[in-house]
Image: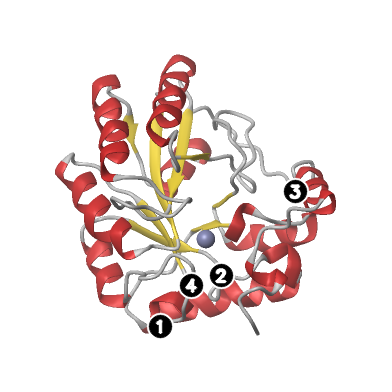
Amino acid sequence: MTRDSAEFERRHTLVGKLGRETARLAARRPACKAPPRAMVSFTFDDAPATAATFAGARLEAAGFRGTYFACGGYMDGMDGPLAPYADWSAVRALAAQGHEIACHTHGHRNCAVIGPAEAVAETARNREAFEQHGLSAPTTFAYPFGDLSAGAKAALAPHFNLLRATHAGLMSKGSDLNQAPAVAIEGAAAARTGITWLERAMAEGAWLILYTHDVAEAPSPYGCTPAAFEAVVGKVRELGLEVVTMAEGAARLTA
Ligand SMILES: [Zn+2]
């Protein structure tokens, strides 16, 4: 299987776009409660090494914890576009500090492309790898590439308390826990985008889920710089938003 296989990219076609939008109407699990107060989550897809080291330490210094959507395949040394990734011991260290280690597909395969049964098998493989390496069973999931189909969503939903996508938005009462929105802090607009959405979450008393990948001086197009990350963390402190992991946030909207 090669890197340019359709399994390893987001579907950029009209069919892909319509598939993601159609899925938003299917297999919904509406949140039964609004968050008690405005809150924010920091999430890191694929757990690149810099997200674990720099960003993890930065969050801890502020008294915050993040959520890392990790792939067993990457932690086992599988190559990927955002390498190097955190290895098992780095991820265990994050867990020991109170960060949430959450589920992606084991080989970072696209759930919409591989289909519902294989998507479930991929997450089972990841869960098993977590267990073998001393991590707790993950309770939340992020769709790799933010891509999904209605069928994959319906098949995966029973296995997690929350499943995160990548369309921008805020979570509150009635929002779909099976296809939760998230705002990217990436590229040149990372800090500005993050700050705008933090203000919006504060004004609406909603839950904002942020996501990025690597946090480095020369980040990938899917990551951000330490300065941008710092600006977003600073704004969270200034606004006094509560910081929750994905698992904690899901519990607030359902308990
Ligand atoms: Zn990913």
The label on residue 20 is 3
Q: Amino acid at mark 4?
A: Gly
Closer to the camera, 95 or 6? 6
Residue marked by disc 2: 108
Closer to the camera, 53 or 164? 53
Q: Disc 3 to disc 2, how far (Cα)?
A: 18 Å
- Kindly report which numbered mark, 2 or 4, lies closer to the viewer in this rendering: 4
- N-terminal of the two: label 3 or label 2? 3
Residue marked by disc 4: 80
Question: Could you tell me which secondary element the residue under label 4 belongs to?
Answer: loop
**Residue 16 x/y as whole percent:** 78, 53
Question: Could you tell me which secondary element the residue under label 2 belongs to?
Answer: loop
Q: Is residue 51 left or right of residue 9?
A: left
Q: Disc 1 to disc 2, how far (Cα)?
A: 12 Å
Q: Is residue 101 left or right of residue 60?
A: right
Instruction: Farthest residue to the left: give it.
Output: 61
Q: Say if disc 1 is inside 8 Å of ligand 1.
A: no
